[in-house]
Image (cartoon, grey):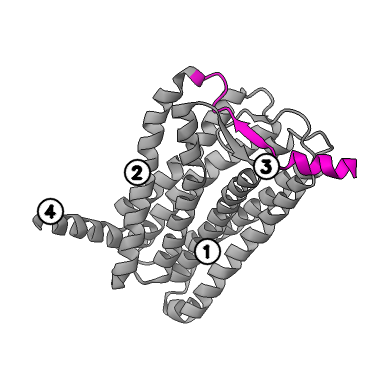
Amino acid sequence: VITTRRIISDHTGDFTLLGIPGLGQYHVWISIPFCFIYLVAIVGNSILLYLIAVEHSLHAPMFFFLSMLAMTDLILSTTCVPKTLTIFWLGPQKISFPGCLTQLFFLHCSFVLDSAILLAMAFDRYVAICSPLRYTTILTPRTIIKIAVGISFRSFCIILPVVFLLTRLPFCRTRIIPHTYCEHIGVARLACADISVNIWYGFAVPIMTVISDVILIAVSYSLILRAVFRLPSRDARHKALGTCGSHVCVILMFYTPAFFSILAHRFGHNVSLTFHILFANLYIVIPPALNPIVYGVKTKQIRDKVILLFSTKATE
């Protein structure tokens, strides 16, 4: 009974988020570019969602998956950034245990879902280039909805056990988190119990999922490139590669810093905590801010609609 009461009391206390260790005196200055990039992410993804919703010409599978990516990016950044800015402006902030669990669930779930959406977009490009005549029969609205529900459910099922793995832990030591937001292993390390299950599940399961996505994306683009270089016309090859250019840029922006951050967290014992947390904060705002810009610049349909939108606003 005593043990049970102690664990329950442990779960009712608050945690304290410190911010970026070693850079406390620079928090206000760091918040300026951080806030600007976050606003770019909010505005850019909102414009993207608006255009895809109102423009009938953008009601295609590629843009449906792009709207999913924009919504997931908004969730990813909004889950963490407002609390982070509060820390930068007002100093260390408290967060309840349920609030911490909610934040880390949406953070990790958004990451896994982003990866799955990029895989779905790679499949869309594969069908469009390798089987263009069957595109509308393969990617029917019913199929697209099944893919969307499937990847969302997969992300939910992968991350939900993380919440239960944390709720089973007793927290009887410090409740100070040297970070700007809650993440699984950072919170687990505060527990006064064995966290080997948390470490291996938190590292192996999401990483294996993401790696499988990367492998399938690589296979898709290998088949796409093989099909492209078999096209007889140089213009046709250039057009086919152009349709994939924005997607490849987004893939690189997402996976390169993600793998660096994850591997540094697990194996980078020589990487300073300050650098790791600063990089982790940049990761939750820079890809969401750049994704709509990349698609707006490199995708002709979106670029034309953005120009039309702002030219119409200017003439009113």
Q: Label 3: state its secondary structure.
A: helix
Give the numbered dot on residue 314: 4
Amino acid at circle 3: His
Q: Residue at x 43, y 47 (%)?
A: 288
Q: Residue at x 57, y 47 (%)?
A: 107
Amino acid at circle 4: Ala
Quote the CA–CA distance across marks 4 and 1. Answer: 36 Å
Residue that label 1 marks = 120
Give yes or no for contact between labels 4 and 2 (Cβ–Cβ under 8 Å): no
Q: Nearer the viewer, mark 3 or mark 1?
A: 3
Q: Which residues are magenta?
A: 1-24
- 10 Å crowding of disc 2: few (<14), some (14-19), many (20+): some
Quote the CA–CA distance across marks 4 and 2. Answer: 20 Å
Quote the CA–CA distance across marks 2 and 3. Answer: 27 Å
Give yes or no for contact between labels 4 and 1 (Cβ–Cβ under 8 Å): no
Residue closer to the observer: 70 or 258: 70
Residue 89 placed where, x, y %?
44, 28
Quote the CA–CA distance across marks 3 and 4. Answer: 47 Å
Amino acid at circle 2: Val
Seen in the image, is 98 located left or right of residue 19?
A: right
Q: Quadrant of residue 239?
A: bottom left
Residue that label 3 marks = 184
User: Between disc 3 and disc 4, whose residue precedes?
Assistant: 3
User: Between disc 1 and disc 2, whose residue precedes?
Assistant: 2
Amino acid at circle 1: Ala
User: Between disc 4 and disc 2, whose residue precedes?
Assistant: 2
Residue 125 placed where, x, y %?
45, 65
Seen in the image, is 241 located left or right of residue 118?
A: left
Residue 163 placed where, x, y %?
70, 50
Q: Residue at x 63, y 59 (%)?
A: 156
